[in-house]
Amino acid sequence: MRNIKLTIQYDGSRYKGWQRLGHTDMTIQSKIESVLSKMTNENIEIIGSGRTDVGVHAIKQVANFKTNSNMSTLQMKEYLYRYLPEDIVITNVDEVEERFHSRYNVVSKKYMYKIYNNEYHNPFLRKYTVHIPKKLDLELMKKASSFLIGEHDFTSFRSSKSKKKSNIRIIYSIEIIKKDKLIEIIVHGNGFLYNMVRIIVGTLIEVGLKNIQPEYVNHILLSKDRKLAGPTAPAKGLYLLEVKY
Amino acid sequence: MRNIKLTIQYDGSRYKGWQRLGHTDMTIQSKIESVLSKMTNENIEIIGSGRTDVGVHAIKQVANFKTNSNMSTLQMKEYLYRYLPEDIVITNVDEVEERFHSRYNVVSKKYMYKIYNNEYHNPFLRKYTVHIPKKLDLELMKKASSFLIGEHDFTSFRSSKSKKKSNIRIIYSIEIIKKDKLIEIIVHGNGFLYNMVRIIVGTLIEVGLKNIQPEYVNHILLSKDRKLAGPTAPAKGLYLLEVKY
């Protein structure tokens, strides 16, 4: 069988997240599977690099599927572009080695979080950023983020719903970039626990608002207590930016 | 009576345009008038700098209204921010001289048109740009636009529904700016006929696609025949950028 890798961009606003759910077809996975199954006349199941939550967006999500179809990858790309809803776009279709697995082979991932930092919100960005009216102190946020770089137990920064056995992950970098009134926080790590990026961002926002000191983030990390970290930042500001293999 | 000037930003996607209509409250004007009337306990009518069509956006629309209210402009701004829908934001509230009139006093206006020029559309920009899959030749478009600068009879570039007596207008400048895959066309003029910017953009797109020669735009202009110009570009790419007084 052929093994096909998809690179996927989506506006998550309308969806119940990535993963197929029994009671609704409003997930990214089920929309794509449904078009692929019609395209190939097979019962296609796709494997994503990982789930994204309700309302989370993606710039470059990756998934793969097996098929006996003899369509070219270009034909597949055009078929998907034509029949998928406007808010899901397959940017690349590539044939890959049979052993390639979108989830098992992940080496690292990058997430981006977008904050609109201005007194009043922006009508064009309201679905794609989180609005923080009070001015954030970026230098304090950068200082706070430095405590999270490296290999740590991120128990304080994962949802209590997380079921992973180990809470140890490596964060390679956290970039905080200001573009006029937009702040982008880009987190690169070898893996992420449930809600980890959103809790990190929620905590960095607390630092930027001067509600907690940058050094306190180190204390939160060492305490392994979710209750000490900041709130989970809203889904609409979060983007799966890149998956590295 | 006090005369209050509003600067207004809106995402026009959900609305039937600027102007109040009898059979629906889904216009920008009626949404703002309704909040202002509640705020002041008066029957407020606002005067806009001009109409925007169904689906057109604004970065800095201007309107004014008369009131006896003794609220401060800051209180008004906060009230409007709180009670207007998320896709309409009043960015400035200023008290102005009694004789200021948002429409009569306009000296010039700037419109912006956004094109997303890439093989596949972008899920995050689909409501805010027009997608042109084929690569546009910007140099040809810039050359074509030069024929429109200055004082001309723009009969070829106005909707046949236009009811203005004179079709003579001055265009001061047309800037065509490329930002990665996004093309912004900014038109500055002393006034605009019905659909004028959208027909200019529709014609420039035809030039960029090499369907017509840049010099042919001069011929279109001189012919005073709407049928020779390009199609009316879709509303969702158009923004009222600035009104000068």
Image: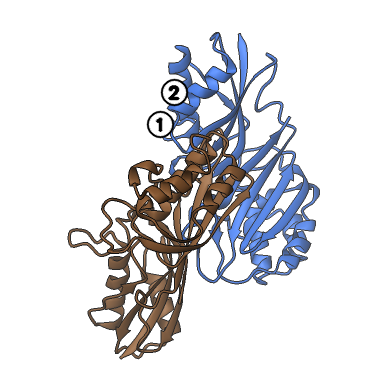
Chain colours: A blue, B brown
Q: State yes or no: discs 2 and 1 in contact (Cβ < 8 Å).
A: yes
The x, y position of residue A87, in whole percent, is 47, 38
Q: Nearer the viewer, mark 2 or mark 1?
A: 2
Q: Residue furthest right?
A: A150
Q: Quadrant of residue B164?
A: bottom left
Asked if B118 appears above or below A226 in the picture, the reply is above
Asked if A65 appears above or below A122 in the picture, the reply is above
Q: Is residue B113 left or right of residue A156?
A: left
Asked if B128 appears above or below B86 in the picture, the reply is above
Q: Quadrant of residue B64?
A: bottom left
- Mark 2 on the same chain as mark 1: yes
Please name the residue shown 32% across and 70% down the image.
Answer: B32
Residue with the mark numbered 1: A25
Q: Nearer the viewer, residue B98 or A241?
A: B98
Residue with the mark numbered 2: A34
Please name the residue shown 30% across and 86% down the image.
Answer: B67
The x, y position of residue A187, in whole percent, is 71, 48
Asked if A94 appears above or below A25 in the picture, the reply is above
Q: Chain of mark 2?
A: A
The x, y position of residue A92, in whole percent, is 61, 27
* Helix, strand or loop under label 2: helix
Q: Chain of mark 1?
A: A
Q: Nearer the viewer, residue A195 or B229?
A: B229
Residues packed near mark 2 inside 10 Å, few (<14), some (14 to 19) or many (20 plus): some
Q: Is residue A220 left or right of residue A77?
A: right
Residues packed near mark 1 inside 10 Å, few (<14), some (14 to 19) or many (20 plus): some
Q: Residue furthest left?
A: B23
Please name the residue shown 71% across and 26% down the image.
Answer: A105
Q: Is residue B163 left or right of residue A193?
A: left
